[in-house]
Image (cartoon, rainbow, N blue to C red):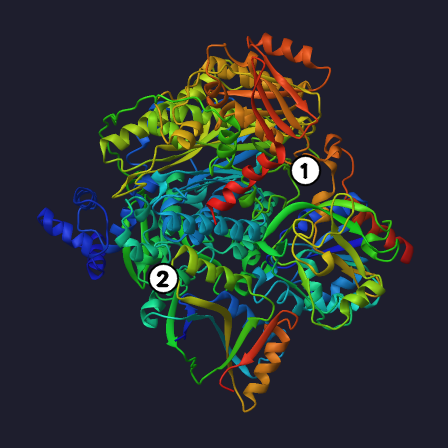
Amino acid sequence: MLFELIGILQRCTQLNIIGLADSDVESNLRGAGIGMSVQEARSIAEVLGRDPTITELFCYDAMWSEHCSYKSSRATLKEFMPTDGPNVVMGPVEDSGIVAIDDKWCVVISHESHNHPSQILPNEGAATGIGGIVRDVNCMGATVVATADPLRFGDPYGPKASKVRWVAEGVVDGIWQYGNALGVPNIGGDIVFNESFDDNCLVNVVSLGIVRRDQIIRSRAPPAAGEGGYDVILIGKPTDASGLGGVTFASEALREEDEETNRGAVQIPDPFLKNVLFKANDDLFRLVREESVEIGFKDLGGGGFTCAASEMGAAGGFGMEINLDDMHKAGDFPPEVLSIAETQERFLIISPVHLREKILKIYNEDWDLPNVYEGARASVVGKINSGNRFVVRHKGEIVCDVPIQHLTGGIRYQREERPRTFNLVEPETQEAADYNAVLLKILKSPNIASREHVYRYYDTEVMGNTVIRPGEADAGLIAPVRGEKFGVAMSVDSNPFYGRISPYWGGATAVAEAMRNVAAIGATPSTITDCLNYGNPEKPEAFWEFREGVKGLSDSCKQIWLKGYENQPVPIVSGNVSFYNESPQGSVDPSPVIACVGIIKDIGKAITQELKAAGDRLYLIGPRFDELGGSEYYRTIFNTTGANVPIVRFDLERRMIYAVIDAIDEGLLASAHDISNGGLACTAMEMALVRPAKFGLDLELDNAADAGMRTDKLLFSESSGFVLEARPGREGRLVDLLRSYDLEPMEIGKVSRKRRIVMKRAGVTVADLDLDEARLAWTSGLVEAMR
Amino acid sequence: MKIAVVQFPGTNCEYETLVAVKAVGMDGEIFRWNRSAGELSSFDGYFIPGGFSYQDRVRAGAIASKEPVMQALTEEAAKGKPIIGICNGFQILVEAGLLPGTGKVEMALAQNVMVSNGKIVRRGYYCDWINLRHEAPPRRCSGSFLMERGSLFKIPIAHGEGNLVTSTPKLIEMLNDEEQVVFRYCDKNGRVINEFPVNVNGSTESIAGICNPEGNVLGMMPHPERAFFAWQLPAFDPRKQRPDEPGPGRSVFESVKRYIEVNA
Amino acid sequence: MSQKINLRVWLKIPDAEAATVKNTLVRRMGFGDVLYDVLKERLFSIEVDSGDPQELAKGFAKELVNENKESYKVLIDELRFEDEYVPVLVSLKIEDGEAISTQERLRGRLGFTSVVNVKKATIWKLYLHGVDRVARAKEIAEGLLINPHKDAYEILGE
């Protein structure tokens, strides 16, 4: 038998490794288009006891890529990240994490990056990002209910402005063209422009789903699969060569001269087919419930068929046999292409044989896939067995026969870390003479200006669940289950300017701000996800930045606590690591992009950020510190970065977040907005400028800081905090509540009927702006930056 | 009373539309495009919901309008049964010749063009809450049967092709004369201003919805199913503070129900 | 001296839109006996007032053609099509916003200042049997490919 097998193997193409010098192995690998190291190739040959086939090497190359195997990051993530908690239903083990809302319902969340493809082909890259993430959520048996896109683009006024704008425009188009057609509302996201993204944009995407706890579907071969010889069923688009090597490409730095070749690695997404597939999947989930059987279900993403199939088999502890001839495909492709191409809009089912005909009927007849998209269908492509090999046949030959756990186990690298050192100094600045001009300039800055120009392209309303939409508050809110009062909030955050000064505080502040954002509408932070965007981990400085970021964001989760559970971290249930965000010109600023999901028990209590009534009193919580490092003020007015980055005072942060949540729950607040970019000044102004922009501000800043603090520092320090508008008559109770959390509420003025933004300190008028002039600056900044 | 919510591949508002149908006390089900079209005759009314049927291939609504279910709906329309096309549903009804109702394609819902002060300020897809004015008299049209003339509605739009254009001479005049213009975009005080952002997509005379001469078939670009509950309203609307109350879009569904009761 | 650069652009991967059009024409509109295939191209007609048209065409293609999934062909001051199908050119007769944006992008952001006009169209390539191919192509154009209130069509090479 063994002899026979070797005989067959020799007939298909093998790559010579054993016995060759490193340089020859290297040239053989590159000649075949395989990116793995010589060392990695040798270790595979050793385990197999022979030279691997081309298909085997391609499969290993995909599975052991940074993208699929987390080979550089896994140890660090394990070391620092809190992933468990009383509300965790499933941590970061499968495609998405799951946390409980109540005894019955759960939120499913996934967070990914699609950075490299979006830099090369912005439209397809961004669209595929959404396409992939919603499959990750759907395959847990969930209904996909929301997406959000944190975006980072280069400097729209810098030397690469035209390319930057081309990327930004294409990405936004890709997001709306895909997301709107799919029919999932976009309820959040953010955009930051900064020159470190000139050659490497970041396109992250977060997706939320909703599922009943007793209806979760796992991405693994179910326990009975081995003995039962369960079917492996591939559904969706016919496999083609698109996205070939996508994961390998995502795991390398971008060079401009490779752009043409890299274009081939970008996948072609199809929201229309996805829309129909999701509905068919709902019927599959229903069938499984009716028949009370367990199936395995997984989407095909990075690493294509091989990744999905082998991971599901390995997770169940089984082997499998696949026949590529039974796969529906768009043409005659070699086996390595069929194995790892990243053709979009596909899922894999592992199911008992007796359900086969019913499952095929759902996809091929009821939802008529072959007539919806040429060549799309469901096909039985293999069988699970109780062995431990991943065996693939093609045209009668065995093209792959490897130990399945070895293939999926990946490898680990202990990367070296070394602090990046550079000279940071606080600038000597002159206080501005004309605050009106400074405020207008900052309001118009591309990083402060209203995001309305972009989010009007997004369908924020489809599904009819949207309670708070982009622009209305610090977080989006949906009511995903009709008849239930609870709402699910989401916010995203990461400030690259802070990360540049301190990758640790960049990570910590991102988590704290994302939590403040959901708290500002009255929701309780329930889970965090992260997409960790860094440079090349093989460079010690980049790897250090990554580790610092993970430490920082983990510390915030551990120190701020899950509300109601002392000393219990807010769990991180899903995430993604994106390395190699660099070009020969340098790497991106450390960008641990954080999403925070919050739960509110009654959507009727949620509040937004626009001022509600003239005469209402405004309170500041969170003392101002001299923390303008990385601030909008330093950057826009003095063109400098500074050194004093905002830090997270964990205990204070926790008390502020809890107090705001409780105040909203008690109905004490009319509006709330958290302090971040642009400091107290921008936070307060935004509350006046956001629609309906009916009221002005009369701010008296004497209580906001000691008299010794310069007014510009008071206004523009980005130390964390909130501006709160009290409901009339509830001021006393609000102050008591804040004090019970050991916070010192600072009364900073009133909502005014006059359409002016007035700021006074020690009796002197600091600024007096016309509301409409301010609004014009604020609403035009992004339009001009993206023109 | 049974309503079919017609689903094409690419439709994406059928579930919330069905929720709204049921919430006003009608029975309803989703009717998949490849079901036998003859079964449609057993329903009392129809919604063609929004989305991207056939991915807007060729142009929005063109492919779906040739499907057998649309042939069947044309026959049901002739019997006076109500058919409400929302967003993509409106586009399909236009392409199928059911609106304005001569059996021919008399107009197009073209790409949005946002014009302000004589300049094009934006194009393409747009999603926002806007204001509508009901233009027809009460009982003129199935989907606005219970609405007073001049009543105002806050409601969301989300489309890239809602700009009503026509080269049919005097079509607009006829629509006005025959009171087939059911909704126009307006400002919060009910003024029709033929400029962005009040006229949100460049539509001729700010027309947002029309009916056929008989009044039983209505097409509208805005989404009443997304404005069905007060909690769905934008933050700055005072009704948001009373989340359990009905939203402005509910009256479309109640109108259809009443229309069916009256005509039964 | 002004020259017209025509870029014919088509998908290398299966064209789902063309497949749907064929499906509808055959299954729903009774063209099954005469129509045996439908393909589609995008056409950009870019008028320039100076410069080497072949070189310019390469620059335009870099912006307008998605080489990940598309191929293209350049024709200067002429528009020829193969004989085996009837080419139906469909363009907007109302203002074409996308063409205007393309022109602005080429001139402004990308610095192709010699561009004086951009027109966009879709070429439907109808593979038809029989003698009255042009008449059938017209039926197809009017029955499905255009909405006469916003689109115009032209049978090329007629």
Residue A534: horizontal and vertical position, in percent?
33, 35
The residue labelled by disc 2 is: C62
Q: Nearer the viewer, residue A387 or C123?
A: C123
Q: Is residue A688 left or right of residue A47?
A: right
Amino acid type at mark 1:
Pro
Q: Nearer the viewer, residue C140 or A636?
A: A636
Q: Looking at the image, is A424 positioned above or below residue A203?
A: above
Q: Residue at x 19, y 52 (%)?
A: A29
- Chain under disc 1: B
Alpha carbons under labels 1 and 2: distance apart: 42 Å
Q: Decide: few, some or many residues near mark 2? Use Cα within 10 Å; few <14, some 14-19, many ≥20.
A: few
Q: Looking at the image, is A368 positioned above or below residue A503?
A: below
The residue labelled by disc 1 is: B234
Q: Decide: few, some or many residues near mark 1? Use Cα within 10 Å; few <14, some 14-19, many ≥20.
A: many
Question: Can residue A33 be seen by looking at this rendering?
Answer: yes
Q: Residue at x 33, y 47 (%)?
A: A247
Q: Could you say whether the residue bearing mark 1 is in a helix, strand or loop?
A: loop
Q: Looking at the image, is B215 positioned above or below residue A440?
A: below
Residue B151: horizontal and vertical position, in percent?
83, 47
Residue B230: horizontal and vertical position, in percent?
74, 37
Q: Residue at x 86, y 49 (%)?
A: B146
Q: Is residue C7 left or right of residue A47?
A: right
Question: Can residue B11 be seen by looking at this rendering?
Answer: no
